[in-house]
Image (spheres, grey):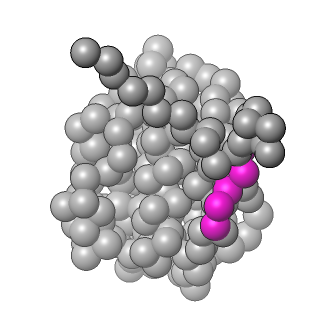
Amino acid sequence: MTAGILDPTISSMSSRGRPSGPVATIQAAAAPPVETLRGKRVGLLENTKRNAAALLDALGTVLTETDHVDLVRMTKQDFAMPLAEDVVDGLIRDCDVVVIGVGDCGSCSAAAVADGIALEQRGVPVAVLCTEAFEVTSRAMAGLKGRPDFPVLLMPHPIANLTAADLAERGQTLAPRVRDHFLGAAA
């Protein structure tokens, strides 16, 4: 018995059959910014990576205090796979904007970006949080998904070993960047 291997760069083949780099086949749509976060339902989609939920909670606490948002917490059970359609539907139904985190490895960073682009194509503004160590992976996935300009909010690596105090500080630091991102300002 043989097994086939999928080539994720198949759309990037040159005329001689050699990979020539990621080339999107379509340009994916971006969701429009919101005018304010006040009173919005902010989805916090954590991916089960160590400290992801705690970081999103710290960020959510700040946004609740400063912008009076309502938090909608959801968990993606398999951080490396695309979001299940029922989770996508729930996010669209229950959230005005979504924060996805945390991309701190290659597969989870790529999946977070792919999920963010998929949600934005359905009209939901998304902020994807990844660590600087996986910027290249994040940008490569964005290009493959038709959004080479997709903004990823980068932060120092790692996340997994941060203390509760470190996570609270990181939430304070990220909150204005996330707010600016959703409002359409430079993050």
The residue lying at 39 percent from left, 27 percent from top is 4
Q: Is residue 96 above or below residue 167?
A: below
Q: Is residue 161 left or right of residue 134?
A: left
Quadrant position of the N terminus in the picture = top left
Viewer-side residue, 18 vs 70: 18
Res 4 visible: yes
The residue lying at 32 percent from left, 18 percent from top is 2
The residue lying at 49 percent from left, 72 percent from top is 121
Q: Is residue 18 above or below residue 87?
A: above
Magenta-colored span: 20-26
- Give residue 65's quadrant in the image: bottom left
The residue lying at 72 percent from left, 51 percent from top is 23
- Residue 24 located within the stretch drawn in magenta: yes
Q: Is residue 71 above or below residue 137?
A: below
Residue that lies at the very extreme toward the left in this rendered image:
86
Q: Position of residue 18 (x, y in %)?
A: 76, 33
Q: Is residue 163 above or below residue 51?
A: above
- Residue 6 located within the stretch drawn in magenta: no
Quadrant position of the C terminus in the picture = bottom right
- Give residue 7's quadrant in the image: top right
- Give residue 12's quadrant in the image: top right
Residue that lies at the very extreme toward the bottom in this rendered image:
35
Q: Position of residue 134 (x, y in %)?
A: 64, 29
Q: Position of residue 72 (x, y in %)?
A: 27, 61
Res 169 visible: no
Q: For the stretch drawn in magenta, what is the main secondary structure?
A: loop
Viewer-side residue, 38 vs 183: 183
Viewer-side residue, 56 vs 12: 12
